[in-house]
Amino acid sequence: MHRGRASFVVVLLFCGAAVYDAVLAAGWLSPGHDPGDDTAGQVVVVVVTLVAVAMTLVLAALRASGLAFALIPLAAAAWMLAHYYDFDPYYLPSRRRYADDGLVAPLLVYVVVLACAAVTLASRRSQTAGAVLTPIVVFVCLVTVALQGAGH
């Protein structure tokens, strides 16, 4: 697959995960009824985002460039931010969000979003900056999402 097309696929995967989490956060999908319940499709979204992270690492190693590759950090940030406002299944049936007094502070989430935006801009100016910084911020997004549900 061409690197530009593969980068576009990664953007779509992260954006799809972001839309899924935004739909959950908006309350359009039921988060479940019992503590620990997974929402329908949650396993698929986890697999999709892990594939997107792995593809990002490969694309960075291949020194991908272009607009689609530059947009990967923003797409990952959108997913991380949407997930932050999603409901934490640990606290079901209450509708407590990860953002409601969770382990990850809002300041950290928004600093990561800003870092992703900066990396997008840097990627447009320098292929080397994109190849080095993109996998770092995408990995930080992944770790931030993982930490959102930690500490129960």
Image (tube, rainbow, N blue to C red):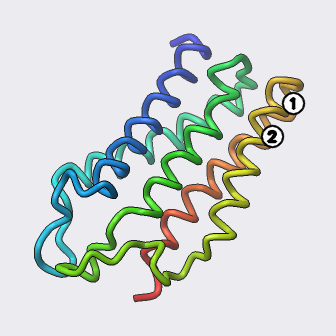
Above or below: residue 1 compared with residue 23:
above
Q: Residue at x 59, y 48 (%)?
A: 77
Furthest toward the bottom, the residue is 152
Quadrant placement of the C terminus: bottom left
Where does label 2 land, which residue?
132
- Which label number is shown at residue 128? 1
Tell me the amino acid under the disc marked 2: Val
Q: Residue at x 86, y 35 (%)?
A: 129
Residue 5: image location, x then y, percent: 53, 14
Does residue 83 lie above or below 34 as drawn? above
Instruction: State which quadrant residue 4 falls in.
Output: top right
Contact? badges 2 and 1 (CB < 8 Å): yes
- Element class at badge 2: helix
| Residue positioned 26% across, 73% down in the render | 89
Q: Amino acid at mark 1?
A: Thr
Q: Secondary structure at mark 1?
A: helix
Image position of 148 (left or right of 92): right
Q: Is residue 120 left or right of residue 139?
A: right
Q: Label 1: how many residues lie within 10 Å, few (<14), some (14-19) or many (20+)?
A: some
Residue at the farthest left position: 33
Q: Please state the total of marks drawn on the protein image.
A: 2
Distance between the alpha carbons at the discs numbered 2 and 1: 6 Å
Q: From the viewer's side, name the closer residue of 56 and 30.
A: 30
Residue 124 on image: x %, y %: 81, 24
